[in-house]
Amino acid sequence: MNVPVLTIVVPCYNEEEVLFETTKQLGSMLSSLIMEQLASSESNILYVDDGSHDKTWTIIEDLTHKYHYIKGLKLSRNFGHQKALLAGLEKAEKKADCVISIDADLQDDISVIRDFMVKYFEGNDIVYGVRKSRDTDSFFKKATAQGFYRFMNKIGVKIIYNHADYRLLSKRALRELLLFREQNLFLRGIVSLIGLKTTEVYYDRKDRFAGVSKYPLKKMLAFAFDGITSFSVIPIRIITIMGFISFFISGLAGIYALVVKFMGHAESGWTSIIISIWFIGGLLLMSVGLIGEYIGKIYEETKHRPRYSIETDLYSKESNRDKSLIKTGSN
Ligand code: UDP
Ligand code: MG
């Protein structure tokens, strides 16, 4: 295998305090990879400025002048971590043979980047960085994150436990990822839909090097909600099921109300009110759920996700695992 061009994509939002240190550490990591012939000398670090309000972009610009291996991309405003990362990945896809995404704050142990590359050389298309423990997280963050992963797995979204967005993607995995054209981005969910040869590398997560978390509770909740609603129509289905249950109960309530009435215990008017409340309630909920089911279908369709991906093609002539790009089914 030729020595691959590696691009390390780093989304940055108000990260002026960490950028110099990050550049120092990632830079020396990159040069040792180049020395070991694990990455080509054209490899680089791509900072994506996600509409920062501080000096982040000025610093990035300076760094690009100072070091040839530093590249910068500036988004027009704050789009959020996921979109910033995607923008960087999309840029990187043009030149890189593989990409690694990592946060700017050095919470993820960069020494495992070497392991990522080794795994890449072993033929893996996706290498997940997985945290061994969450000791440095607050109790609240730990509990909410764990609850979230569990819930996501329950509703059928396969995401890797304790994996954030620290991972390596080969060019072919990256191309597959870029075929998912949805607006609601939840990258770690999509990456697990790609398939291909995948492995994990474990590391310890540290404290933020400097600055504060750019993920306040509000952003975290929005992120979780995006994750759930962009991968599952189960919440809608729950409404439909509740509608059916309530409709069924309306039948029972009806019988009960009639029995009470004929036994002569009922206040006048009570029976009809009880029956209609349950009946109409059930009917409404069921209808909303049914409409929701259709909206759910439309929603699935409008995403224009690829319907299948081919890893190896033994039908077409030029098929060759290393050479061929993955062909994807049209919509
Ligand atoms: N980030 C971003 N846009 C945002 C929020 C965060 O690009 O709107 C970047 C941020 O600069 C960092 C990464 O996403 O590189 C993860 O953010 P942070 O470390 O604050 O999240 P936490 O580790 O607290 O979950
Ligand atoms: Mg962080």
Image (tube, helix red, strand yellow):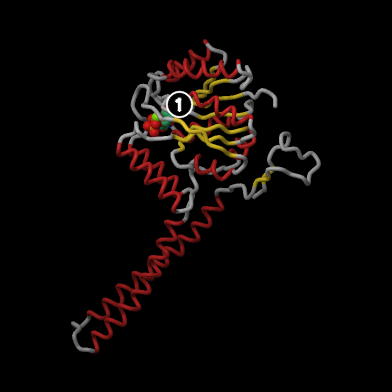
Picture layout, residue 314 above or below residue 34: below
Residue 51 at least partly seen: no
Q: Residue 222, position in %: x, y?
A: 39, 42
Find the residue positioned furthest to the right: 317
Quadrant field for ligand 1 = top left
What residue sits 63% from the left and 32% below the top? 122
Q: Quadrant of residue 262?
A: bottom left
Q: To which residue does mark 1 refer?
A: 109
Distance from mark 1 CB to nearest ligand 2 atom below 8 Å:
no
* 179 horizontally vs 112: left or right: right
Where's the N terminus, which quadrant? top right
Q: Residue 285, position in %: x, y?
A: 38, 66
Q: Nearer the viewer, residue 220 or 288?
A: 220
Picture layout, residue 29 above or below residue 126: above
Q: Quadrant of residue 137?
A: top left
Q: Nearer the viewer, residue 307 or 172?
A: 172
